[in-house]
Image (cartoon, grey):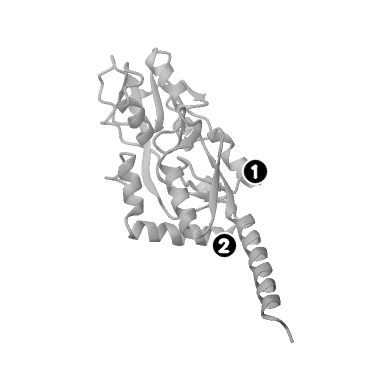
């Protein structure tokens, strides 16, 4: 006859095995960028990546049953790092464009926006479109949808490519660029913090490239995408997403 103690020991061993297996599956590497506030940024006090998209993927993980470790990297390396299995998820200020959807899959929409335009503060012209800057030298961030969109217009004498948005702002600030293009909410956030006082965000400008930030996964990770979308929908419904957007000053537009 099998003793009660033996049954309990077997049950405990099975539980430990299952727990260990589940634990091994629960930690996913998330690629984020050290620039891109309020979506992602390097918090110099803690030396960690923080921001809206970090808060969001952390909350999604809690609901979906996985934890995350955030891997800092340049924006232009995110997709290659995902497809190369160096990370499992992209949670950054990345628009779900048609070109990117050919390479990776995206979650349901998180936050819609387009490019913003910045010029030196001394330039008071109310630019409405790219045509208003015909023949000028402008800048955009490497790896973003804006670079190709700007070049395809054929309007500019040169579209300079920069590693980060602060690099663009710096050259607009010093007058090396006539204008710079980058994610509208990131530009607005940087300027609202008092950075680059000689730069002006052109509120009259209408963006050419409008899309939505979303979470990226490999095309082979369909089950993970289903979990992310289910949790994202739940967090939108219960108000968690709205709270996160409000925390980072983007509550009026999030969806």
Residue 220 visible in this rendered orientation of the protein: no
In the rendered image, which quarter contains the N terminus?
bottom right
Few, some or many C-alpha atoms within 10 Å of disc 2 (few <14, some 14-19, many ≥20)? few
Q: Is residue 133 above or below residue 25?
A: above
Could you say which quadrant of the image residue 4 lies in?
A: bottom right
Q: CA distance from mark 2 to mark 1?
A: 19 Å
Label 1, secondary structure: give it: loop
Residue 80 visible in this rendered orientation of the protein: yes
Q: Residue 217: image x %, image y %?
A: 56, 51
Left or right: 106, with 25 as reference point? left
Could you say which quadrant of the image residue 153 lies in?
A: top left
Residue that numbered label 2 is attached to: 223
Left or right: 102, with 209 as reference point? right
Considering depth in this image, is 133 or 78 the residue closer to the camera? 78
Could you say which quadrant of the image residue 204 lies in?
A: top left
**Which sits earlier in the primary sequence, circle 2 or circle 1?**
1
Q: Residue 172: image x %, image y %?
A: 39, 18
Residue that numbered label 1 is attached to: 86
Q: Residue furthest bottom?
A: 1
- The residue at 44%/52% (across/down) is 59
Considering depth in this image, is 77 or 46 the residue closer to the camera? 46
Q: Residue 141: image x %, image y %?
A: 48, 29
Q: How many marks?
A: 2
Few, some or many C-alpha atoms within 10 Å of disc 1 (few <14, some 14-19, many ≥20)? some
Left or right: 145, with 7 as reference point? left
Q: Is residue 134 above or below residue 53?
A: above
Label 2, secondary structure: give it: helix
């Amino acid at each position: 006859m099998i003793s009660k103690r033996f049954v309990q020991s077997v049950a405990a061993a099975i539980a430990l095995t299952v727990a260990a297996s589940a634990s091994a599956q629960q930690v996913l590497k998330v690629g984020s960028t050290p620039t891109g506030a309020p979506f992602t940024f390097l918090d110099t006090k803690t030396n960690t990546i923080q921001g809206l998209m970090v808060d969001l993927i952390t909350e999604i993980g809690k609901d979906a049953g996985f934890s995350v470790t955030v891997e800092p990297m340049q924006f232009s390396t995110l997709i290659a790092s995902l497809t190369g299995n160096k990370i499992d998820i992209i949670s950054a200020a990345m628009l779900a464009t048609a070109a990117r959807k050919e390479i990776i899959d995206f979650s349901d929409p998180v936050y819609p926006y387009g490019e913003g335009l910045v010029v030196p503060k001394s330039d008071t012209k109310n630019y409405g479109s790219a045509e208003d800057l015909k023949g000028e030298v402008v800048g955009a961030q490497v790896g973003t949808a804006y670079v190709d969109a700007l070049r395809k217009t054929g309007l500019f004498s040169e579209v300079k490519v920069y590693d980060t948005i602060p690099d663009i702002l710096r050259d607009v600030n010093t007058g090396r660029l006539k204008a710079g293009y980058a994610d509208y909410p990131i530009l607005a956030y940087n300027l609202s913090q008092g950075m680059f006082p000689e730069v002006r965000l052109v509120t009259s400008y209408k963006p050419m490239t409008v899309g939505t930030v979303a979470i990226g996964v490999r095309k082979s990770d369909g089950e993970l995408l289903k979990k992310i979308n289910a949790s994202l929908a739940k967090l939108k419904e219960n108000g968690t997403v709205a709270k996160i957007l409000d925390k980072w000053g983007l509550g009026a537009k999030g969806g």
